[in-house]
């Protein structure tokens, strides 16, 4: 199922959501100006490489800067390819505006970044030996999904079922769609335990960490209650 949109209109203009989308796209396009070796170097320097924090001598030998935790935050705004950036931007477009609506702009910014940081920390904790740079807004977006799951469980999500590429669209409750998303993440982390080398380049644990962070933290940041959905 590919999500297309939700059915909850915004009360306020989601300027933070639009800004986050624009910032992610801008950084991605700027990276396209660099050569491939330069991009790889940037991803290693500003993406999250867990091994650099657990094996400082190894990190120093490879030229990683010492004692910097900027990648925990900067990795949230980096993306590895077109499909990566487009899918994340699409999820922000669908789900973030309504969460911003009930938090207000300053609180939503803090919420988004905190969820991203927690997702980074969870990925680090479960993958201490990984030398693969993890990048992407997925952990922060997972926090948004966690908030949406509890704020709008009965909102309708319009999804496309790509059977032979036919235009088959159905509406499913957000609780079902996001519940299926959580089950997928759990399946992937379970599989990663059995075949770690195959799945180590995706921050499945980070996704779950971000989702749980969003589910827990959102109640402390609301400035208004969500609109009731029939």
Image (tube, rainbow, N blue to C red):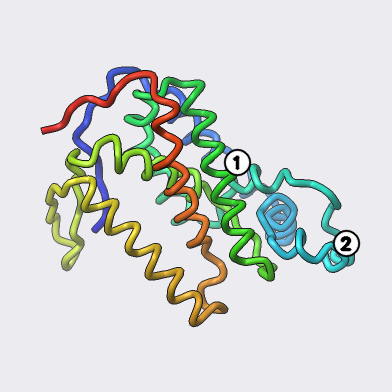
Which quarter shows the C terminus?
top left
Regarding mark 1 in the picture, which secondary structure is present there?
helix
Q: Which mark is residue 204?
A: none
Determine whether, in the image, residue 61 is placed left or right of residue 171: right
Pointer 2 or 1: first along the chain:
1
How many circles with numbers are drawn on the protein? 2
Horizontal and vertical percent position of residue 215: 39, 42
At x 23% / y 26%, what residue is drawn? 9
Q: Nearer the viewer, residue 104 or 2?
A: 104
Horizontal and vertical percent position of residue 13: 36, 19
Which residue is denoted by mark 1 in the rendering? Answer: 27
Callout 2 environment at 10 Å: few (<14), some (14 to 19), or many (20+)?
few
Q: Nearer the viewer, residue 139 or 163?
A: 139
At x 69% / y 60%, what residue is drawn? 49
Regarding mark 2 in the picture, which secondary structure is present there?
helix
The correct choice, above or below, for 150 with respect to 122 in the image is above
């Amino acid at each position: 199922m590919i999500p297309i949109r939700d059915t909850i209109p915004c009360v306020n203009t989601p300027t933070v959501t639009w800004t986050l989308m624009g910032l992610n796209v801008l950084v991605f396009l700027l990276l396209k100006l660099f050569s491939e070796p330069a991009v790889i170097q940037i991803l290693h320097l500003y993406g999250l490489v867990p091994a650099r924090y657990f094996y400082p001598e190894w990190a120093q030998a490879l030229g990683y800067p010492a004692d910097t935790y900027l990648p925990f935050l900067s990795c949230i705004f980096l993306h590895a390819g077109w499909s990566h950036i487009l899918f994340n931007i699409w999820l922000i477009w669908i789900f973030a505006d309504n969460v911003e609506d009930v938090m207000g702009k300053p609180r939503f910014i803090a919420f988004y970044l905190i969820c991203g940081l927690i997702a980074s920390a969870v990925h680090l904790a479960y993958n201490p030996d990984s030398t693969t740079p993890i990048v992407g807004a997925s952990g922060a977006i997972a926090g948004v999904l966690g908030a949406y799951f509890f704020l709008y469980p009965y909102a309708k999500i319009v999804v496309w079922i790509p059977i032979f590429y036919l235009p088959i669209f159905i509406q499913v409750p957000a609780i079902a769609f996001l519940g299926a998303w959580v089950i997928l993440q759990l399946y992937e982390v379970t599989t990663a335990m059995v075949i770690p080398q195959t799945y180590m380049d995706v921050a499945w644990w980070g996704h779950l960490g971000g989702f749980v962070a969003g589910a827990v933290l959102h109640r402390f940041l609301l400035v208004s209650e969500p609109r009731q959905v029939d």
